Image: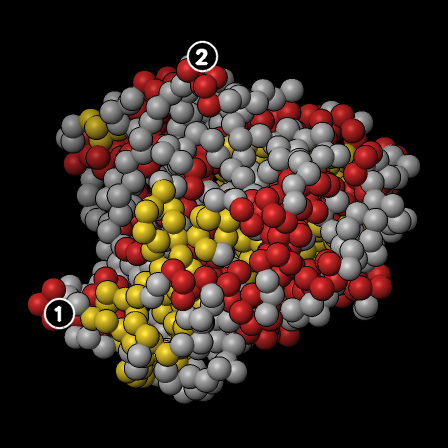
């Protein structure tokens, strides 16, 4: 695998929503709001002249429109411009943007991802619809979380992780979210409150599963030289990235281990020249849509060999040695479907801009039933 | 608009593979993708372990009947434990897949990329066409129960009315492409028909008749791209990607004049500028414009600047676009002749130009010597144009 | 090599059937909600961008050309010029229809025939197959035929069709 030639700067971010419903705006209007904010943040640029390429990250069945790409351009300024859709997580779209810039085709790229999950009436049927039609869907699973349950049990057995540990993750993240303006689901609960809950699918209770949320996020990236002209030194740099699919077949996948995170992060670390991720980063922003996943992902990312030990010793809390999801993670903010990667990236950017750290690791997963992860290393220049 | 012609790395296509395009295939989408991908690797002389990254192109998930279709297809496309992602611009996906494959290499991220496009339309009941009910604005257009042929028929009629073009002139495209497809071993509908056959065929949505339309198909296509230093190691005849362009027009197709595909022109200009082409009619030797309907080929030839507005039918009649003409168009037989498994069809057009430039197009090889070729795809609601220029 | 099948062959192979359950309640948002309410009143509303003077029908709260919010609601005439029209003999499931369904695109007034973008609406046209086949209908001035006030629900269906005047 090669390496990029140019450094890529994140020069603008904008978001709108992060609420359980957004009845006053259509998804298009939501993206327009987020895009307007992002372009202002990027140095007051006009997307009609200053942005060279536009990428939208959406999936038909989350939108309820076949060829949802049709509705991508207008609200982000991409009409009659190079606009395309990457059907995947927002961080995969970001990877494409980095490629647009490094291939010479663009200097400034705008990426959007949004979620109008409140419009979806049959969400669990759509998750089921993503399962293999012959081998998995045909058993008619009543609850798609069963895959998370199987994965969690195997992981917990292998690494000696308990239900109490999962409850500690929920408590940590829910509390941390109280300081974030985007955390609609933050609350001051304790691990005992979580343990008192019944299981939805063993070993996960309702509180172990992040809820879904509406929101739109637009991020503008640019070649670093161009970024300097627009923002002087007020930008962040993408030092490395990686994305991979470990398997799309449930039977042959290795459950209980986040291989996708291992491979994706290795790719990103190699690009960034990082040898010890635990020492390198000031904070980690990782998918925690199931409480156990945060711990499983930390192992995959080489941030923690013994996640439950680190958790119990307080190393992962906001004041700890390696804060994980110090602004709440998905458990406090909700999962905005394919914009999840950007939700985590936004937290990382906020964290660095607030002066709490200089280097952050962002790692996203696409959710059940996928085994696909994306990783980005972002830091001050 | 930024078009940087100082590209960082030169990228070549070094292998391609196609499956048969047929109305219905027994194989699953993953198996179809696998066959196309392995054929492409064979031609390139590579194995899957040599590939760094995979790009998948596939249009509506609803066809194959799996949500998050990109994840599902990563299996057959060789994307397991590799960076794999899916691009999606409606019908223009096929060429976009090639473009994405190009920038994976041109950016320096990957050295050898496998780009796979697959579509399986046959599973849908009552008819694959019914899927197109959901591509419209759900609030303002869907209640009228539109089907896809309506929008093409409207555009065709507008094109005919604006430039005074008759159905007989348009039908010549169908005749040409189906005749070209007779020489294509992968084709679904190669045959020798006449203009009269077209005009007598079943009226679907006037002015569109059955033989004006490309069929529903299953099929897969794949190409292997590599950076310059590697390409020369694996082949003596690398075909270079010299220009890429893509555009998406606004969502409001009822509020735009449909007689001219300005989005394809924009994408073409982007690709031509990158390739250093200033006089397309003089510098392009062979073209594969997207032809889901016969009039669309003419519509696109004009937008690709290979004919003046409204004049493509005249040039067609004069034989300019025939396989032995000045600018052979759709020598593969196009979608009308080969079949239309949406994403795979676009990539098939790219592969056709690749084989023409390599000189391995067999019976489809055009008579004149070829150096520069262009492939183009269209998509969404009269919005997406993707163009790629290749040279040998 | 892949295996082509004929329709009759399908019964010889194992086929799995599945009907996806995909239901949505689409949020109309600000622009489309006002448009639908306008239809209920028997009016067609558009949004005007004062910078480029374009009237957006269907309305949008942003002008995609200028990339700025649109400025005001304006009412456009429920009359316009037929840009194109077609006659459909197939339903959305590809079943055959006896009587053709005539639909088309109408460029609403005020606008003029040199505009490439204009306030436009896609709807049924009350005309005969002959008028479509001869292209006579294209360029004609048409007006909306509204459903009676009590039957209007705030939907695109509140207009029955556009008829030549």
Q: Which residue occupies the foreground of this view, B218 or A158?
A: B218
Q: What mark, if any, has residue B305 been given in the picture?
A: none
Q: Secondary structure at mark 1?
A: loop
Residue A321, relative to residue B126: is it above or below?
below
Q: Which residue is mark 2?
A: C12
Residue B61, relative to residue A231: is it above or below?
above
Residue A325, relative to residue C15: is it above or below?
below
Quadrant hosting residue C159: bottom left
Q: Which residue occupies the foreground of this view, B383 or B208?
A: B208
Quadrant hosting residue B32: top right
Q: Is residue B345 left or right of residue B255?
A: right
Residue at x 64% of width, y 74% of height: A229
> Residue C16: x and y, percent?
38, 20
Quadrant hosting residue A109: bottom right
Q: Is residue B273 visible?
A: yes
Q: Secondary structure at mark 2?
A: helix
Q: Is residue C33 visible?
A: no
Q: Chain of mark 1?
A: C
Q: Which residue is mark 1?
A: C148
Residue at x 81% of width, y 68% of height: B278
């Amino acid at each position: 695998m090669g390496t990029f030639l140019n450094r890529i700067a994140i020069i603008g971010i904008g978001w709108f929503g992060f609420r359980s419903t957004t009845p006053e705006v259509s998804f298009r209007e939501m993206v327009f709001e987020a895009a307007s904010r992002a372009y202002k943040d990027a140095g007051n640029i006009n997307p009609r002249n200053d942005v060279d390429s536009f990428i939208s990250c959406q999936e038909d069945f989350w939108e309820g429109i076949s060829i949802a790409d049709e509705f991508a351009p207008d609200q982000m300024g991409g009409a009659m411009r190079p606009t395309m859709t990457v059907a995947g997580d927002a961080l995969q779209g970001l990877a494409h943007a980095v490629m647009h810039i490094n291939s010479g085709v663009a200097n400034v790229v705008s990426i959007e991802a949004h979620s109008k999950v409140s419009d979806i009436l049959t969400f669990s049927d759509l998750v089921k619809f993503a399962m293999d039609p012959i081998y998995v869907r045909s058993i008619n699973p009543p609850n798609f979380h069963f895959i998370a349950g199987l994965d969690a049990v195997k992981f917990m057995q292998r690494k000696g992780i308990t239900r109490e540990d999962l409850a500690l993750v929920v408590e940590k993240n829910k509390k941390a979210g109280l300081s974030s303006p985007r955390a609609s689901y933050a609350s001051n609960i304790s691990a005992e409150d979580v343990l008192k809950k019944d299981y939805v699918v063993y070993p996960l209770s309702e509180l172990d599963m992040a809820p879904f949320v509406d929101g739109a996020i637009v991020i503008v990236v640019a070649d670093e030289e161009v970024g300097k002209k627009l923002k002087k030194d007020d930008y962040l740099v993408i030092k490395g990235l990686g994305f991979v699919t470990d398997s799309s077949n449930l039977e042959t996948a290795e459950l209980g281990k986040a291989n996708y995170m291992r491979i994706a992060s290795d790719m990103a670390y190699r690009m960034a020249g990082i040898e010890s991720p635990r020492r390198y980063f000031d904070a980690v922003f990782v998918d925690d849509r199931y409480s156990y996943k945060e711990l499983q992902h930390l192992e995959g990312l080489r941030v923690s060999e013994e996640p439950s030990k680190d958790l119990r010793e307080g190393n992962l809390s906001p004041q700890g040695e390696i804060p994980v999801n110090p602004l709440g993670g998905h458990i406090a903010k909700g999962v905005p479907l394919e914009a999840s990667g950007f939700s985590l990236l936004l937290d990382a950017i906020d964290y660095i801009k607030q002066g709490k750290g200089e280097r952050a690791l962002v790692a996203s997963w696409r959710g059940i039933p996928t085994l696909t992860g994306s990783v980005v290393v972002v830091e001050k220049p | 608009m930024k078009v940087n012609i100082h590209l960082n790395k030169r990228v070549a296509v070094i292998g391609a593979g196609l499956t048969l395009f047929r109305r219905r295939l027994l194989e699953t989408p993953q198996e179809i993708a696998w066959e196309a991908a392995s054929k492409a690797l064979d031609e390139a002389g590579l194995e899957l372990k040599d590939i760094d990254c995979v790009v998948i192109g596939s249009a509506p998930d609803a066809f194959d009947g799996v949500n998050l279709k990109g994840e599902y297809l990563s299996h057959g496309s060789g994307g397991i434990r590799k960076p794999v992602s899916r691009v999606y611009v409606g019908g223009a996906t096929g060429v976009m897949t090639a473009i994405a494959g190009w920038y994976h290499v041109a950016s320096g991220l990957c050295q050898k990329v496998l780009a796979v496009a697959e579509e399986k339309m046959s599973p849908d009941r009552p008819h694959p066409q019914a899927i197109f009910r959901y591509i419209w604005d759900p609030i303002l257009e869907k209640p009228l129960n539109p089907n896809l042929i309506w929008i093409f028929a409207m555009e065709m009629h507008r094109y005919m009315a604006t430039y005074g073009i008759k159905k007989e002139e348009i039908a010549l495209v169908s005749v040409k492409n189906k005749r070209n497809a007779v020489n294509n071993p992968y084709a679904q509908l190669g045959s020798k028909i006449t203009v009269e056959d077209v005009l007598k065929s079943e009226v679907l949505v006037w002015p569109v008749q059955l033989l004006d339309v490309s069929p529903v198909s299953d099929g897969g296509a794949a190409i292997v791209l590599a950076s310059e230093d590697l390409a020369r190691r694996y082949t003596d005849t690398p075909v270079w990607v010299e220009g890429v362009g893509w555009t998406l027009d606004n969502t409001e197709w009822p509020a735009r004049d449909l007689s001219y595909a300005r989005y394809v022109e924009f994408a073409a200009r982007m690709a031509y500028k990158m390739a250093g082409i200033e006089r397309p009619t003089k510098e392009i030797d062979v073209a594969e414009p997207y032809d889901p309907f016969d009039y669309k080929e003419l519509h696109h030839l004009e937008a690709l600047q290979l004919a003046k507005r409204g004049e493509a039918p005249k040039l067609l009649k004069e034989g300019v676009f025939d396989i032995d003409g000045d600018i052979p168009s759709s020598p593969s037989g196009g979608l009308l002749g080969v079949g239309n498994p949406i994403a795979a069809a676009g990539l098939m057009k790219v592969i056709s130009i690749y084989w023409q430039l390599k000189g391995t197009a067999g019976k489809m090889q055009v008579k004149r010597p070829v150096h520069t070729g262009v492939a183009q795809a269209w998509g969404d609601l009269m919005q997406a144009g993707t163009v790629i220029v290749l040279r040998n | 090599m892949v295996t082509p099948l004929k329709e009759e062959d399908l019964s010889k192979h194992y086929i799995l059937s599945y009907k996806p359950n995909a239901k949505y309640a689409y949020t109309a948002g600000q622009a489309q909600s006002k448009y639908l309410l306008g239809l209920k009143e028997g009016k067609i509303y558009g949004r005007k961008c004062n910078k480029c003077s374009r009237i957006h029908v269907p309305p949008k709260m942003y002008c995609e050309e200028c990339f700025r919010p649109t400025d005001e609601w304006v009412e456009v005439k429920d009359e316009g010029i037929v840009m194109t029209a077609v006659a459909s003999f197939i339903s959305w499931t590809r079943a055959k229809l006896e009587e053709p369904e005539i639909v088309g695109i109408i460029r609403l007034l005020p606008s003029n025939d040199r505009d490439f973008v204009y306030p436009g609406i896609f709807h049924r046209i009350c005309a005969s197959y002959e008028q479509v086949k001869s292209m006579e209908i294209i360029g004609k001035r048409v007006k909306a035929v509204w459903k009676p006030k009590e039957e209007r629900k705030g939907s695109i269906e509140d207009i029955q069709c556009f008829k030549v005047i």
